[in-house]
């Protein structure tokens, strides 16, 4: 371990070759660092498909900014260059692992597999690699070959106060036997009866089994399978008013008491068993062919408390909050009567009288359901689940060829087919006796006997029991093909690559219910949308001498829209988003690196420009008590910024470092919007005034200073990070031209567009201390990671504007009156965890 | 390989680790988790006595509301609620002597206040008043009576026993247009053998298409047989878009008043049945 640490420190502090700037990296930061990065990520982030907090893990051996920020800034949900995670492409043994529908990779799929995830080939956006054209936010290729794992046992026990509190991990690797066999196995269990946030639990098993046969010098075959059945409950965002009432920024409205026991309404069950067969063929000394066949069956279920013919039972529903009675923002509001103030006090006193009062009262829900059933009415409250299952296969092959000593050509293809199965199920009727598969949002707009209120005309008025599918049921089929090639070269001064790819995507919806809102366009298969896309990248590094290096990169790519953003209202009909196109992405970067005995420095500047971007979202639109399905098209965006990484080597053991970025990422135009609401089923076209809206849920500016001491088996790091310019997800519907006109924000010439709301940044101090000890038999490592030591609980990690207007409307759409409650001033927020830590004890033998 | 067996064993054992969000036992809901179970039955008066006591308030020509400052209680059955969305943030309660509305600023009342549920209401510190002479318990709104907040309401009522639909059915009486409005308003009654004037097989109760004038999101539909009676339906009612039945019908509902007009609030579309 000591040796490894020294090597790793040396790797960070010493000069690296020019080649490393633009060609593939096998990513090895220190063992502990990668452990921290991975553990932090898999423990805290990217696990909830509803949250926009996915991080991007990039890494690099040469660019110290990229090598550090992935985990260093992850407590603030930092995303590399503020890019969507779909631009970060993950491979395992060359097989693509990003979800074909969303384009994103969820790290929870390899959660608990820390030991298997160490060996990674990373490439930054303008670094070539051996497995694909480098992606816009970098590409990672994990090596899951049993013969590559160091032989022996490894047992790790961890305690934490994060999403889980205990983790046990056991790994056994046989190493490669004389007969050419290698076996590997891992089992990890992570658990919390209560995680960092009250009301959350965590229960996850991870397994990994692999066998590899090396037949001879030329051929080897590896079969690995892994998965992690996980059951966990979630934290919900809340407004600052709720956090203030609860006296905690970790107030969680998703749970409540049922007969005195804590019950969370949002439970996720996630299990995606995956198998991967890899064939390596060393054709000759300069050619190697790697072929990987993967199969996955993913099962994802996420529950939620829903209601029918009632008020939202969420305990932080706005009508429960004091400020819905008294306008706390304008004391002079004429609605602020003595009675209003008295009601403010009643609400406040109720919510602060006991913790139970500000959580879900499950017993009341059961009682109300029994009352509803007695009247013959459908369940008033129930637990439903969103199910996203997926069957996916991929075949990927790459041929690596060293053309000459200084040139190489890598090329490959990827074929994949995915069937995503999306349906809603009834999980718990909470004591009610009946429920029907009826669109209750449309009742009233349409008569009870109208076709439009039927979710499935093939089974009208179907009785829904626990376990039954209702509401929606459809498949999304996606087939993809991609070919790529990368040519790399180097000479005494220049190192470079040129890479290109061409791909095709076909997607289709296959409806399993005949929705009454679209009776001729919801059951059965839609047409097939086909996209041809591709692009190229070039990167060059010039050695300027004296340890200086200049790097340049440029790319242009047409990228097909993902299936997740291609259907207008997939829960209802087969319609594709109108005006669906490939998005075009221009990317460029210039960098300077200095390497000398006392300093390693990287400074990079980048500029990305995207056109024809499509975004899609669905949300519950309070104004109309229905869901709204929204597609935004023809969006133009740009992202630019500077990044720095400085490592001042004060002594052989002690360094002072600084990392940071100042960036911008925003929309350049007002986009076309089309939306459909679930209570009417009619499409509306409008313009969304979202010009200038910024990428959200990630700090756009981050500043860091770190101290690092690595010597004598000790490993001590202290980092101060300042996060700033964290924007919240903006609500498009508040910025439709028609809405602005109705609300009086249009003077006949100009629109007054609400500013995008911003979260709070702040300072966070993190530390890590580790020690490795060689024992008579084996090696013991102890590592303590502490995050947010100063317990700054005021840093926003993300959130969103509430979609509801501050005004109520008349039936004709004109403004009725101002509401007392100001939705525009009450965004739903998440805060970074206060002081939290993790202690790892690892024993290897 | 021997060691790999331990690994497999560990996996198998852990695979049987139980899930944490298992099946939840249904909680007991007796006594009810809604309302205030500490209210003791002490000073119960009938609804008729209540109306008499505050007759000048209920009948005032200009709407008013007064606070009940005595320890008074009423004990009554819920006869109408928001189960179909036609009655909004109100329930009607009735005992053997009379009926009254209770205004509560809350949705989903019908779950814990289903038709047939008996409740005890502690009136002290609540307000009583008239809205265009319709008697109601609630809170002041402008100078008249409106809905009380849900926090106050939860402190002032108690659920008694189980739902008794038969009891409520036994309270139903026949309506006649010349009844005493003060005495009978809010009662659950049936108007027999009448015709909805605008019913033509297509016209709905309360459409939002502009075909009928709306007041406070409600449509009034006339009855051929009585000029001072209307069927009043909210556009938010589940049956708002249903066509009104034609021919002679029996209409059951909560007979509220708006000054001297009877306004029948249907509790569901099943409240209208063909006249035999």
Image (cartoon, rainbow, N blue to C red):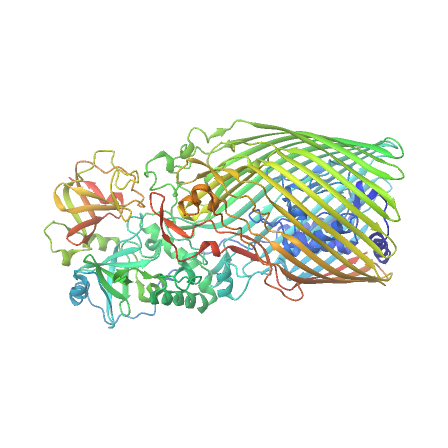
Task: Tell me residue B137's x, y (percent).
Answer: 25, 62
Q: At 63% from the left edge and 66% from the top edge, which residue is drawn?
A: A791
Residue A654 lies, with reference to residue A566, above or below; the image says below
In this view of the protein, which residue sits in the foreground, B96 or B152? B152
Image coordinates for residue B33, horizontal then vertical, percent: 38, 62
Query: Which picture quadrant has residue A76?
Result: bottom right
Q: Residue at x 36, y 45 (%)?
A: A814
**Image quarter (top left, top right, bottom left or bottom right) of the C terminus of chain A:** bottom right
Q: In which image quadrant can residue A44 be found?
A: bottom right
**Quadrant of the image containing the N terminus of chain A:** bottom right
Q: Is residue B26 visible in this depiction of the protein? A: no
Give me the residue at 33% from left, 39% from top.
Answer: A448
Instruction: Place residue A101 in its image quadrant.
Output: top right
Indicate the position of residue A302 as horizontal and vertical percent values: 53, 47
- Where residue A735 appears, as percent x and y from the top left, is 48, 45
Left/right placement of residue B176 relative to residue A819 reads left
Position of A77 relative to A159 (above/below): above
């Amino acid at each position: 371990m000591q040796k490894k640490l020294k090597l790793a420190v040396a790797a960070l502090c010493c000069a690296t070759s020019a080649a490393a700037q633009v060609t593939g990296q096998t990513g090895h930061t220190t063992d502990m660092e990668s452990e921290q990065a991975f553990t932090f990520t898999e423990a805290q982030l990217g696990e909830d498909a509803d949250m926009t907090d996915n991080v991007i893990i990039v890494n690099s051996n040469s660019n110290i900014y990229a090598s550090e920020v992935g985990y260093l800034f992850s407590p603030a949900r930092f995303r590399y260059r503020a890019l969507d995670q779909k631009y970060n492409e993950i491979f395992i043994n060359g097989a693509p692992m990003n979800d074909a529908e969303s384009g994103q990779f969820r790290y929870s799929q390899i959660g608990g597999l820390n030991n298997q995830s160490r060996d990674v080939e990373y490439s930054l956006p303008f670094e070539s690699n051996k497995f694909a054209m480098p992606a816009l936010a970098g590409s990672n290729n994990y090596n899951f070959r049993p013969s590559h794992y160091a032989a022996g046992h490894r047992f790790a026990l961890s305690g934490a106060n994060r999403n889980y509190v205990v983790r046990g991990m056991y790994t056994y690797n046989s190493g490669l036997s004389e007969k050419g066999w290698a076996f590997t196995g891992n089992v990890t269990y992570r658990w919390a009866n209560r995680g960092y946030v009250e009301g959350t639990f965590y229960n996850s098993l991870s397994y990994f089994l692999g066998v590899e046969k090396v037949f001879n010098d030329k051929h080897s075959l590896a079969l690995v399978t892994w998965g992690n059945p996980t059951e966990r409950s979630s934290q919900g965002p809340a407004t600052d008013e709720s956090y203030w009432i609860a006296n905690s920024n970790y107030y969680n409205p998703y749970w409540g008491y049922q007969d005195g026991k804590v019950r969370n309404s949002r439970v996720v069950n996630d299990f995606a068993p995956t198998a991967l067969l890899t064939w390596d063929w060393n054709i000759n000394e300069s050619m190697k062919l790697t072929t990987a066949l993967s199969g996955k069956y993913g099962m994802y279920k996420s529950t939620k408390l829903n209601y029918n013919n009632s008020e939202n039972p969420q305990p932080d529903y706005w009508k429960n909050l004091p400020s819905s009675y008294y306008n706390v923002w304008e004391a002079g509001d004429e609605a602020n009567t003595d009675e209003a103030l008295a009601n403010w006090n009643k609400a406040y006193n109720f919510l602060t009288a006991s913790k139970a009062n500000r959580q879900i009262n499950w017993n009341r829900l059961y009682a109300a359901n029994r009352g509803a059933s007695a009247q013959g009415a459908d369940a008033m409250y129930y637990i439903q689940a969103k199910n996203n299952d997926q069957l996916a296969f991929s075949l990927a092959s790459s041929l690596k060829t060293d053309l000459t000593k200084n040139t190489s050509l890598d090329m490959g293809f990827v074929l994949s087919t995915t069937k995503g199965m999306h349906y809603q199920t009834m999980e718990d009727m909470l004591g009610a006796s009946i429920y029907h598969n009826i669109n209750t949002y449309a009742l009233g707009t349409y008569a009870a006997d109208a076709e439009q209120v039927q979710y499935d005309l093939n089974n009208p008025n179907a009785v829904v029991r626990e376990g039954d599918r209702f509401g929606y049921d459809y498949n999304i089929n996606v087939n993809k093909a991609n070919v790529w090639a990368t040519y790399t070269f180097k000479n005494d001064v220049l190192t470079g690559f040129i890479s290109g790819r061409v791909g095709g995507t076909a997607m289709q919806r296959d409806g399993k219910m005949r929705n009454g809102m679209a009776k001729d366009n919801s059951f059965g298969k839609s047409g097939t949308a086909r996209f041809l896309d591709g692009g190229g990248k070039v990167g060059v590094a010039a050695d300027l001498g004296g340890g200086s290096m200049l790097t340049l990169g440029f790319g242009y790519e047409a990228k097909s829209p993902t299936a997740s953003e291609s259907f207008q209202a997939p829960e209802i009909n087969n319609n594709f988003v109108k005006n669906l196109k490939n998005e075009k992405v221009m990317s460029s970067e210039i960098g300077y690196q200095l390497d000398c005995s006392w300093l390693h420095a990287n400074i990079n500047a980048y500029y990305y420009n995207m056109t024809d971007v499509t975004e899609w979202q669905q949300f519950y639109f309070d104004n109309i008590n229905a869901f709204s399905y929204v597609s935004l098209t023809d969006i133009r965006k740009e992202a630019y910024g500077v990044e720095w990484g400085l490592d001042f080597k004060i002594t052989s053991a002690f360094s002072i470092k600084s990392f940071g970025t100042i960036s911008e990422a925003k929309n350049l135009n007002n986009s076309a919007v089309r939306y459909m609401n679930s209570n009417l089923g009619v499409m509306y076209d409008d313009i969304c005034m979202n010009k200038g809206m910024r990428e959200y849920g990630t700090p756009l500016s981050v500043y860091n200073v770190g101290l690092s001491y690595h010597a004598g088996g000790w490993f001590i790091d202290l980092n101060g990070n300042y996060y700033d310019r964290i924007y919240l997800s903006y609500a498009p519907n508040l910025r439709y031209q028609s809405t602005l006109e109705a609300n009086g924000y249009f003077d006949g010439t100009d629109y007054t567009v609400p500013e995008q709301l911003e979260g709070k940044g702040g300072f966070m101090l993190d530390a890590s201390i580790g020690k490795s000890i060689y024992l008579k038999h084996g090696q013991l490592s102890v590592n303590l990671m502490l995050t947010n030591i100063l317990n700054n609980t005021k840093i926003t990690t993300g959130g969103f504007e509430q979609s509801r207007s501050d005004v109520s409307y008349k039936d004709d759409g004109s403004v009725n009156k101002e509401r007392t409650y100001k939705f525009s001033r009450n965004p739903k927020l998440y805060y970074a965890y206060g002081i939290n830590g993790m202690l790892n004890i690892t024993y290897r033998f | 390989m021997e060691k790999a067996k331990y690994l497999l064993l560990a996996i198998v054992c852990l695979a049987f680790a139980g899930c944490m969000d298992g099946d939840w036992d249904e909680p007991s809901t007796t006594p009810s988790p809604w309302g205030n179970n500490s209210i003791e039955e002490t000073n119960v008066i009938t609804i008729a006595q209540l109306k008499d006591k505050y007759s000048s308030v209920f009948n005032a020509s200009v709407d008013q509301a007064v606070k009940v400052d005595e320890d008074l209680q009423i004990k009554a059955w819920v006869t109408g609620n928001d189960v179909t969305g036609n009655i909004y943030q109100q329930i009607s309660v009735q005992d053997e002597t009379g009926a009254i509305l209770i205004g509560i600023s809350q949705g989903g009342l019908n779950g814990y206040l289903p038709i047939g549920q008996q409740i005890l209401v502690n009136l002290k510190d609540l307000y009583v008043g008239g809205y265009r002479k319709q008697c109601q318990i609630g809170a002041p709104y402008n100078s008249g009576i409106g809905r009380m907040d849900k926090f106050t309401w939860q402190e002032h009522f108690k659920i008694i026993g189980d739902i008794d639909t038969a009891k409520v059915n036994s309270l139903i009486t026949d309506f006649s247009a010349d009844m005493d409005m003060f005495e009978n308003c809010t009662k659950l009654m049936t108007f027999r053998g009448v015709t909805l004037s605008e019913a033509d097989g297509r016209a709905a109760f309360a459409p939002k298409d502009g075909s009928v004038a709306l007041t406070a999101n409600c449509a009034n539909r006339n009855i051929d047989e009585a000029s001072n009676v209307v069927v009043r339906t909210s556009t938010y009612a589940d049956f708002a878009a249903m066509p009104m039945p034609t021919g002679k019908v029996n209409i059951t509902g909560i007979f509220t008043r708006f000054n001297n007009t009877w306004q029948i609030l249907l509790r569901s579309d099943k409240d209208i049945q063909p006249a035999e």
